[in-house]
Image (cartoon, coloured by chain):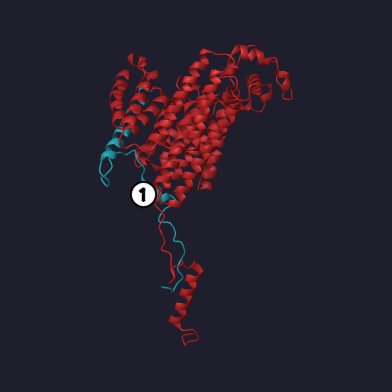
Chain colours: A cyan, B red
Amino acid sequence: MESFLLFCNVVLMALAVVLTVVDERRKRGAPRASPFRINEAMVARESKHRGAPPPLYTRRKGRK
Amino acid sequence: MRDLVLALFWVVAIPLAFINPAAGIVIWVWDALLSPTELAYSFMQSVETNKLIAIATLISFAIAQNKDKIFFDRTIAIMVGIVLVATASYMFALVPSDMSDQLYMKLLKEMVLAFAIMFLITTKEWLYLIILAVTVALGFLGVKEGLIALLTAGGHHVVGSRAVGDNNQLAAALISAIPFMYALWRCTASRTIRMGLLGAIFLTTVTVIMTYSRGGFVGLIVLALLFLKGSRHRFLTLILLGIAGAALLNFAPEAWFSRVDTIQDASSDTSFMGRVIAWKISYLIAADNPLLGGGLHAVQLQPVWTHYARDLRQLDFIYTPPADLTPHAAHSLYFEVLGDLGFTGLLLYLGLFWAALANCKAARKAAIKSRSMPWMIDFSDAVRTSLICYAVTGAALSVGYYELLFVLVAISVCCRRVALSTMPEPEVVPVATSAKGKRVPQMARLGVARQNSRQNFGVGSTRF
């Protein structure tokens, strides 16, 4: 069991690092190869601290 | 077979470190915390992989063309202070020894590792990877020992590993890794990895319990309280913790309850009283040498122990039995540093905790303000929780020079740096100016707008 876990550990680290290096070299906007990354959409959905910051002051109704 | 797999990994990893120094530092951290070569059976045991990856990473950083500027902040200043005090303490030690030579070199290497993390991890992708490296390295031990504990129905007693130390130190390390697992579970894109992390959290918790460490038990309670405090769904979290507590009461072995019960009878527990004696002797060393202490691991040296054991009656206001002849380790991060590096060293260590927590707070504040990186809130909370748990469990363990502490501090610096660099530029609001070019105050602007609206509707007009 220890050998199997060590093998998974080594493969996981190798994949994580290699795919992140590959992603870094890709152009901006290209689809990411690595599953070892932050899912920003998912985190933003679950967070209350998301979206555009509130405006400096709110307009009153009826005013242009 | 293990040796072949490890050899193949290093054949890929070392050139990768030359290509990208951030990749090198991630592998370096993983290797430092796990020491996979110690798990090898034959030729890989003699290969100094940590040295190789360190050299490759540092060379790659030195020759990198697009490296970010080396910066200097309060955390780095405190760490440099610790190095200087440790160097002076080592040079003017009460009793030189081979043990202090090895510890000094270990401390220097850990500091180099920490500085390298701070300078090389500058983007969110690599910040994620470094947290993953800590999780995977420590999670290996947590998952392995947890599985064995479950398969033996609680009959397995976790004794620690050569990489981390004894069962108490392993418990402290694993408790510090659990918040990272949770933060990664919340942020990771892949569902498979998230399920794996959830399983790792459960098995690591089982492992901490099976270390039979009293410090680990206290650390788990602190972790649960911090988790409850930071949770958005406190009622649900309370229910989950209640279920976990009930499962522990029902399934933990009898020997574990006997071990934990000894916390209440500390004064009659010879192991605990031995630690109090070590704490007293560490204090006496520091009182005699307030600036630099007695040297690295001074309390564990026979001549130092014998000399200060005679003066134990100076601290009779805390009762302890007479000291025995065999030196003991300080069994406390704080007393260990106090005895080794004096009051100066202790103040610097406390300052290091303070600076790291302040970094986490700054990163969290920047993430909340910008609203564009909610994942940074999870990361900074995880680092903060790990540091607090390390500080609490370290009160009863000799973990003052364990690399995880400096890795956590370095990651806190990276969090702050990434958060501040990712914050969008504040939008410049155009300021109204009068005909003379003077700035019109906001209230005056509103007054002008109100006047305009009166003109539009007509004050006293038939509209109303």
Amino acid type of the residue tagged 1 in the rendering: Ala
Q: B304 or B9: which is nearer to us? A: B304
- For label 1, the SS is helix
Structural crowding at the residue carrying mark 1, measured as other residues with C-alpha within 10 Å and reported as few (<14), some (14–19) or many (≥20): some
The quarter holding residue B217 reads top right
- Residue B300 position within the rendered picture, expressed as x and y whole percent measured from the top left: 58, 16
Figure disc tally: 1
> Seen from this angle, which residue lies furthest front?
B436
Q: Residue at x 43, y 73 (%)?
A: A63
Q: Residue at x 44, y 61 (%)?
A: A55
Q: Against B222, is B367 above or below?
A: below
Of the 4 image quadrants, the one containing the N terminus of chain B is: top left
Q: B340 or B264: which is nearer to us? A: B340
- Residue B190 position within the rendered picture, expressed as x and y whole percent measured from the top left: 34, 40
Q: Residue at x 30, y 20 (%)?
A: B7
- Residue B132 position within the rendered picture, expressed as x and y whole percent measured from the top left: 39, 34
Q: B262 or A18: which is nearer to us? A: A18
Q: Chain of mark 1?
A: A
Q: Against B19, is B303 above or below?
A: above
Q: Is residue B454 visible?
A: yes
Q: Against B434, is B323 above or below?
A: above
Question: Which residue bears the numbered disc 1?
Answer: A41
Q: Against B362, is B338 above or below?
A: above
- Residue B77 position within the rendered picture, expressed as x and y whole percent measured from the top left: 50, 34
Q: Is residue B242 visible?
A: no
> Seen from this angle, which residue lies furthest bottom?
B462
